[in-house]
Image: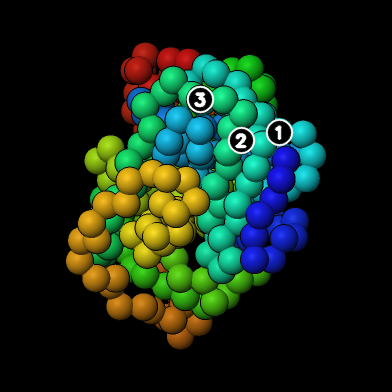
Amino acid sequence: MKLRSAIAVVLSSIIALTNVSPAEAVIGGRANTADSVARIILGNSLCAGTLITPEWVLTAKHCITEGGSRIDVAGQAFAATEAILHPEADLAVIRLNGSASATPAPLSGENLQPGARGVISGFGGFNARFIGSGQAYAADATIARRVTHLPSDDPSATLLEGHVTGGRAQHGDSGGPLFVGASVAGVTSMASETGTGAFFVPVAEHLDWISRHTGTARPAVIGSPSPLVDAEVFPTVLPAPQVPAIGISEIESLLNYGFDVRVLSS
């Protein structure tokens, strides 16, 4: 796989707010319905991503590592032929070795404000341990604020802080989408240890870069970015999990949603 970046280096994860296993992802969520959500296996790294054109997947830069590649999109398996890394933000785009038949997700041009609601998606619990299964799970997220100086490997990053309900975000969700409606408005960069907090790269602030490298349509920008909050001065305060943090996705899903076959279908 070819890497292209202003700094062509192999990057390590910036998930400094969590100490959970990278084999876990959305725990206790419901079944995802967006077929654009991709599972990305690069070397020993498990991440998520979003199909934004038939041949390009948007993900987090820290997910790009050396080694073999497999990207699963709606039941189709691909290899990565090229990865382009953003020179500053935790963003990357991966070119597939073929065209996916799934419907790509459009980019959102909306600058999300505190109180905005969306849906995160990734690969969680038992299913994440098997390359061939690939059920994505989803949870709800509410934007709390736009922050910088988080305790991470890149404290200068500007991210959207979200509170997660109806599931818990985990390490394996890195690179996955924050959907607002059908459009991808954020890329998951970090998660808190409790999984009730997630931090997203705001897509609206990087539309030119994404569109230039992938050819996807650039939407009009809506609104202005919300004020930037210094997380060193005003530290993150996150809610407690809604249900006991058992650590087994299927059980937490039952506690969150009850015996609903739409939640546990695969």
Name the residue at 56% across, 52% down. 92
Quadrant housing residue 9: bottom right
First reached walking from the N terminus: tag 3 or tag 1: 1
According to the image, label 1 marks what residue?
A: 69
* Distance between the alpha carbons at the discs numbered 2 and 1: 8 Å
C-beta proximity under 8 Å, tags 3 and 2:
no
The number of discs equals: 3
Q: Position of residue 44 (x, y in %)?
A: 76, 39
Badge 2 marks a residue whose secondary structure is: strand
The answer to whether one can see residue 29 in this image is no
Three-letter residue code for mark 1: Ser
Q: CB of mark 2 within 8 Å of CB of mark 1?
A: yes
Instruction: Report the mark closest to the observer, 2 or 1.
Output: 1
- x and y percent of residue 192 in the render? 53, 57
Q: Which residue is mark 3?
A: 99
Q: Residue at x 42, y 39 (%)?
A: 52
Q: Secondary structure at mark 1?
A: strand
- Residue, x 27% and y 52% (percent of image)? 219
Going from the N terminus, do you reach mark 2 or mark 1 first?
A: 2
Q: Nearer the viewer, mark 3 or mark 1?
A: 3
Q: Is residue 14 above or below residue 23?
A: below
Corner quadrant of residue 173 = top right
Q: Tell me the number on the disc at residue 195.
A: none
- Point out which mark residue 40 bears: 2
Crowding around mark 3 (Cα neighbors within 10 Å: few <14, some 14 to 19, many 20+) is few
Residue 266 in the image: above or below residue 54: above
**Looking at the picture, which amino acid does disc 2 mark?**
Ile
Q: CA distance from mark 3 to mark 1?
A: 16 Å
x 65%, y 42%: residue: 82
Task: Point out the frontmost of discs 3 and 2.
Answer: 3
Q: Nearer the viewer, residue 155 or 211?
A: 211
